[in-house]
Image: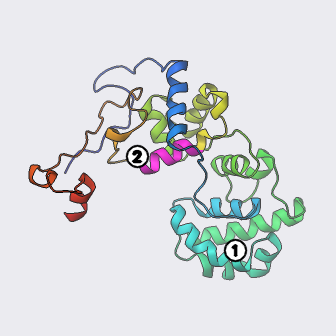
Amino acid sequence: MAATPRDTIAPAGGSPLPPLSARQVKRIFDRLGEANPAPKTELHYSSPYTLLVAVVLSAQATDAGVNRATKGLFAVADTPAKMVALGEAGIAAHIRTIGLWRAKAANVLALSRLLLEQHGGEVPRNREALEALPGVGRKTANVVLNEAFGEPTLAVDTHVFRVARRIGLSAGTTPHAVERDLVARLPKRWAKAAHHLLILHGRYLCKARTPECWRCPVARDCRFPDKVPAPRVKEGLRQRPGFSASTEEKSQ
């Protein structure tokens, strides 16, 4: 079995590399932005409330799985009042395919009640108020503030944590430390988009076990010591018209 690439910006047995320069950081985000000029969440939502619910449900679940579950849920309950009327059992019936669905159903019901009781049924545009809601932590609050209200916040999920450390944007060992490092160094132009740029880069290119470094737009500045080369193509197959490395991989 091939070894999992190291998630670090330090060479094996060596000291951490010096920080990236401001010019390098700007170039990294410029290139990520060029590669993905309109980054956005892949969660489906129609309002700040449905976004909040979707993000709460997305903990330890894929966006695709959440979208499948919320399609039916939001068809019958897309406001706090409707969600409370649906009840915990009704919510649970729609989200059983998502991990931790029992706890999440309870949290969605509880946060919906609090929105009605304390915020007039509206999602607050305030970090402290958001984090006071059941099932809502710093990461969820950052996503809602960024996506729903356009705030330049940066939610650090597993993708952002991995990518920031691999590239060399942060050597932080906790999500909060990585968030602090990123916010301090982000070019103003990319302050709002950085969250999605890093998530999507981590989801589709800088993947945990098999980063596709050979086609990475920021490889020039990336500090990752174990860059993965392009897959080798068999000589006989290379000569076949229309052949690509992905074709070979699919056939195996």
Colour setting: rainbow
Q: Nearer the viewer, residue 178 or 160?
A: 160
Residue 78, x across and y down, in percent: 75, 72
Q: Nearer the viewer, residue 161 or 176?
A: 161
Residue found at x 41% / y 34%: 166
Q: Mark on residue 247?
A: none
Question: Which mark, by number, is residue 205?
Answer: 2
The magenta span reads 196-204
Residue at the image position 58 percent from the left and 46 percent from the top: 196
Q: Is residue 132 magenta?
A: no
Category of crowding for the residue at label 1, using alpha-carbon neighbours closer than 10 angstroms: few (below 14), some (14–19), many (at least 20): many
Picture quadrant where residue 150 is located: top right
Residue 184: give x, y in percent of width and height.
63, 26
Tally of numbered discs: 2
The amino acid pointed to by label 2 is: Leu
Q: Which residue is mark 1?
A: 74
Assess whether mark 2 and mark 1 are in contact (beta carbons under 8 angstroms): no
The disc, 1 or 2, on the residue closer to the chain's N-terminal end is: 1
Amino acid type of disc 1?
Phe
The crowding category of the residue bearing disc 2, from other C-alpha atoms within 10 Å (few below 14, some 14 to 19, many at least 20), is some
Mark 1 to mark 2: distance in Å?
A: 31 Å
